[in-house]
């Protein structure tokens, strides 16, 4: 299975972590979204030319949440990451849709503003704060964000929280999130190395693109 990916992209990080949890080895093809040749090659597979894009024996799928669900449903030895029980799954889905539509959306808006305007406007800051307050509530209601064990929702929300480093966001006010980050990352024996590669890749990207960002 090939995954077109770049470690600095949170949606790619999420899919890579899901694959690690499932014990799937992916043939990772590094795809630079700023490189015309890479974008042209990707566009042949995915008209939306987004990473991550997965190719499984000719079957092409993109959108990280859809890829993650596909991997669990096809290759998971059990349904732990995406439970089949409708009530449990509905909570996982709620958190996943909260991530794509609210949390990650606001994290990304803040990162874009920081890159383009060197500052995060008050209004965006407020929206991010509201999303983080909800996240704090979710991670303290149960052992994990959607169930009493790790699910896809933990992996995706972890990606959004990790991305806050782009804007050097201080999580001091969110002790629940900080404790949950430790618990979720401890679920991955390779997490420290994985995190190191995110940091190194992101630093390289910031330098090579001449971005005025402290990271
Ligand atoms: N909702 C998509 C977002 C994917 C996405 O926008 N990825 C960015 C990199 S983080 C990308 O490929 N941008 C290039 C483009 O849109 O052409 C997902 O979760 O997979």
Image (spheres, helix red, strand yellow):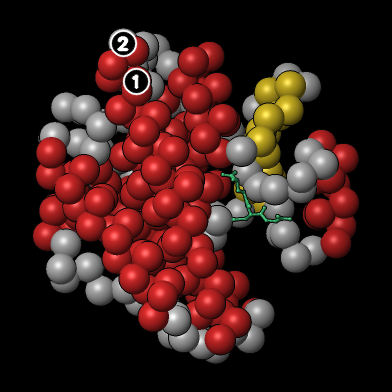
Residue 142 numbered mark, or none: none
Look at the picture and state if 92 lies above or below 130.
Answer: above
**Image vertical order of residue 50 relative to residue 58, above or below:** below
* Label 1 CB less than 8 angstroms from ligand 1: no
Q: Residues within 10 Å of mark 2 (few under 14, many from 20)?
A: few
Are the residues at dot 2 and dot 1 in contact (C-beta closer than 8 Å)? Answer: yes
Taking the spot 41% from the left edge, 46% from the top edge, the residue there is: 99
181 or 89, nearer to the observer = 89
Quarter location, residue 162: bottom left
| Figure quadrant of the C terminus | bottom left
Residue 97, given in percent of the width and then of the height, sits at: 44, 38
Q: How many marks?
A: 2
In percent of width and height, residue 214 lies at 44, 85
Q: Residues within 10 Å of mark 1 (few under 14, many from 20)?
A: some
Check disc 2 and report its element: helix, strand or loop: loop
The residue that label 1 is drawn on is 89
| For residue 186, side relative to residue 24 (left or right) | left
Identify the element where label 1 is drawn: helix
* Left or right side of 119 for 85: left
Q: Compared with residue 29, is residue 204 higher up or lower down, i.e. above or below?
A: below
Give how far across and how far down residue 128 sits, in percent: 36, 65
Q: CA distance from mark 2 to mark 1?
A: 6 Å
């Amino acid at each position: 299975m090939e995954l077109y990916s770049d470690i600095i992209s949170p949606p790619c990080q999420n899919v890579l972590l899901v694959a690690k949890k499932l014990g799937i080895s992916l043939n990772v093809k590094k795809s630079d979204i700023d490189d015309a040749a890479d974008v042209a090659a990707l566009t042949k597979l995915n008209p939306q030319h987004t990473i991550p894009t997965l190719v499984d024996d000719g079957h092409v799928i993109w959108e990280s949440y859809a890829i993650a669900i596909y991997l669990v449903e096809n290759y998971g030895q059990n349904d732990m990451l995406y439970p089949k029980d409708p009530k449990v799954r509905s909570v996982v889905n709620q958190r996943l849709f909260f991530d794509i539509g609210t949390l990650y959306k606001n994290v990304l808006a803040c990162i874009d503003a920081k890159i383009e305007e060197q500052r995060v406007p008050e209004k965006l800051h407020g929206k991010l704060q509201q999303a983080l307050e909800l996240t704090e509530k979710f991670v303290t209601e149960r052992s994990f964000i959607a169930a009493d064990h790790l699910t896809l929702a933990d992996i995706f929300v972890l990606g959004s929280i990790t991305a806050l480093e782009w804007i050097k966001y201080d999580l001091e006010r969110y002790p629940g999130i900080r404790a949950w980050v430790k618990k979720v990352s401890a679920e991955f024996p390779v997490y420290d190395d994985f995190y190191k590669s995110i940091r190194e890749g992101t630093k390289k990207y910031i330098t090579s693109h001449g971005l005025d960002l402290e990271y």
